[in-house]
Image (tube, helix red, strand yellow):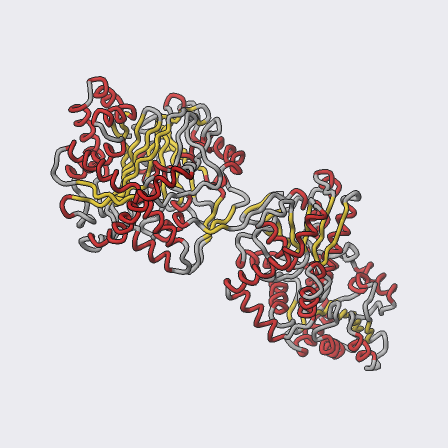
Amino acid sequence: MTSGRGRLTVSTTSPSGLAEQAAPSRLLVVSAAVGPGRHAGSAAAVEERAARLWPDCEIRRVDVLDAMGRVTGPALRRLEGRRLPWLSDLGYRELCRRVWFADATRRVTGALAGRALRPVVDGFHPDLVVSTYPLGTSGLDWLRRRGRLEVPVAAIVADFAPHPLAVYAEIDLHYVASEPSLFALWRSRPDARAAVGAPPVISAFHPVDGAERAAARAALGLPVGRPVALVSGGALGAGSVRRAVDAALDADPAFCVVVACGQNEVLRHGLIALGEPADRLLPLGRPDRLPELTSAADVVITGAGGATALEAVATGRAVLLFEPAAGHGRANAALMERAGLGRVCADAGELTATLRELVGTPGSRLAAERRAAEHAGALDFTAEVAALPTLTRHRGSRPLAAADALYVAAATAEVPQQVGAVALLNPAEAAALDPERIAVGLRARLAARADQLPLLRRRLWTRPGRRPRWLVADELDASRQITSRVVGAGDGTSWAEAVREFFDAPVPVDRPPWQLEVLRDVGDGAGRTAVLAKLHHALGDGLVVTATLAGLLSDRPAPGLRAVPEAGGGARARAGARLARRLSRGLVRLVTAGRTALEAPRASSSRRRYALIRLPAAGVRALARQLGTSTTALLLGLLGEALHRHGGLVGNPVGGANGRLRTLVPSTANRVRRGPAGWAAGPEAPGNDPAAVLLDLPVGEMAVRERIAEVAEALDGLRAGHSVAARLAVLTMGRLQGALPARLGSLVYGGRFFGLIASVLPSWRRELRVLGAQITSVYPVLPLADGVGLAVGYLSWGEVLGVGVTADSALFPDAAGFADTLLGVFGEVFGEVADQRLAGQFGAVAGHV
């Protein structure tokens, strides 16, 4: 069984082979004896196939309406059987149009049905559950969400139009009736897993040829040489049966009209009273030979795409849908017609004309029969049932965390929010590996580790006015996610141009929003090989990029990230008062931060410039110790010095008065606990930490040591209260619904609030190898924000501190020149402060990539 974009293709292995793969010991079938009978009929079809496949399996059917008690169940059964057309149409229309109404209804029905089914599930302990009734499916979804049902769960949607209350995100698989049904389901629930299934009918309904049709007529006493129409109103004999009969009788004097009246004795006696001979009109009650009647008919006339329509398609018959019932009935008929399996006749005149066409033009009837036979013949309901025990657990969509949703709101066409990294491989070890061979190895690695890296299977789902959500991609097309490229040869593309092209292109949103590219330079930088990685910022920040790279690329799977455990109760109590004071000051600063903007920021462009430089990691740490400060303060202080010397920011920098440049500094260093093995994380670790500080980075005239000391003092004063305040603000904004979060996100995350992004990521000291080639250094590639022209990221990997510069070509045109200035500042400080050994390290390592 394979899957893709939520759709599954079921193996056509023989039923006996599938039965050997997985044989459940207890099968629970959830249904209800209600309405036109398609739900109970589908349940019978499942039970028939299951008994044949697994003779030792205990099969139990539960009527969910019976389980709901003596009041609720009978009330719902009566409501289902006696619908008012206008009310049915209104209810179905509102469920389809109003998402909040459908969600609220699902919650109510799920709770009612789930509580009723819980004792059944707990008492029976099934290892496979199949539902054929929407209310039962809602109850199973409710149990799933509460961790009470972890065995495979499937739903048979016995309608051509999946009802909004019949499809649920936590069900492992929905079988629907046709391709149009599948796309209708995905439009309403894109996080549901579904597949086109064979008509869920008992095996007595099967395709028959002309000889079998003649034999069925002879056995039933029907005329062999005349056209036969079967008119059915389902188990209740409901709908426009009488008008359908009149229209069929008017179509052709040769017509023999057989009527399945079901439980409607009033209808049957009324038709008998017409006095037509039996070879012209044959009203039947609840026929026990309905499969033979369907086989004997030339055309089947019914009200909508219910049980009769499914049985007719399974038998390979032409189907006419006459005056379908309001609401869901009309939707069923429309989708069945779109699938080419039926024709809708809106009134008696149209039905009469269509019947005359089918009789007068045999090719038209034969074409309809062929389409039905091809549809049914391409599918195997027995094989589909046999595959159900092998279903994997499906999880529906999840709303993005508030911090992750911020980057969806802040993204624009000019400034897509994506983070990345460039991982350089040891040139001597990578030279023996063809880039495509590396890509092929990584694709295989992705297939093997996708379950351990669930972040790589997430896909964004956005709708106007709604909070964005994550969907789970059942399959990854590794060839589209991981590619390779060789530059510097025939195409004339340089290494720098290839890097820019990769990171300038937005990540796709029609599949998991991340990409890798293995890049080999055979030009001036012959032998240089790197893995370029980028992902949507909603998936995570630079820390997550690095951890994901480690988990996917490493020959030995590396641990990922783990959130820092909370302090104990005593520690929290001691720090509470101090944190409250800092939090209050941080909130005040955060609220008033935008007031220092001198003017509206300049517009961003879609063109970027990138520069990568390397510094000695151990030397930078030693230099910070000699200066009596933290590595973060040193790096940010020297960044301010480089900006002072270089200049180049177009327009007035935010907070630029008094020689200060307001800088957004994500607090990534507080998110992880470092250990001897590196980072560690669980699959549900947050993608982005909303904690950040707005640092007024000194860029005016002052001594280098004074600048570093001022940065250190500012960071100490800001970090606790301001970062927690930022987290609180983002979390609050993320709880809002509609378009407001997007507007707020685009307002607060951009050039009106800060003019520079600078991130110092935790170091990675463990050796990692990709197909035997060591990753020698990693360089972060940070995103910009609207109106923000420069972002600088630092990441220590092994012996190298990688520095990534991202610049907007319109707001900060000279990224390479700024990188030169930054290198010069570090070299000067190393020369003045560091000893000879450290200065030697700088000379040996520092430079452009």
Between residue 268 and residue 67, name the one nearer to us.
67
Quadrant housing the N terminus? top right
Q: Is residue 787 visible?
A: no
Residue at far top of view: 837
Residue at far bottom of view: 274
With 491 as the anchor, is 381 left or right in this view? right
Q: Is residue 91 visible?
A: yes
Query: Which residue occupies 85% across, 69% down?
Result: 222
Picture coordinates of residue 510, whole percent (x, y): 46, 49
Quadrant housing the C terminus? top left
Between residue 755 and residue 227, name the one nearer to us.
755
Query: Which residue occupies 83% across, 68% down?
Result: 225
Picture coordinates of residue 320, whole percent (x, y): 69, 69
Query: Which residue occupies 83% across, 63% down?
Result: 289
* Figure quadrant of residue 640: top left
With 146 as the anchor, is 533 left or right in this view? left
With 656 as the anchor, is 72 left or right in this view? right
Query: Which residue occupies 44% across, 55% down?
Result: 462
Picture coordinates of residue 416, whole percent (x, y): 35, 48
Relative to residue 427, is residue 235 depicted above or below? below
Picture coordinates of residue 567, whole percent (x, y): 41, 37
Relative to residue 547, is residue 743 depicted above or below? below
Between residue 718 and residue 355, name the one nearer to us.
718
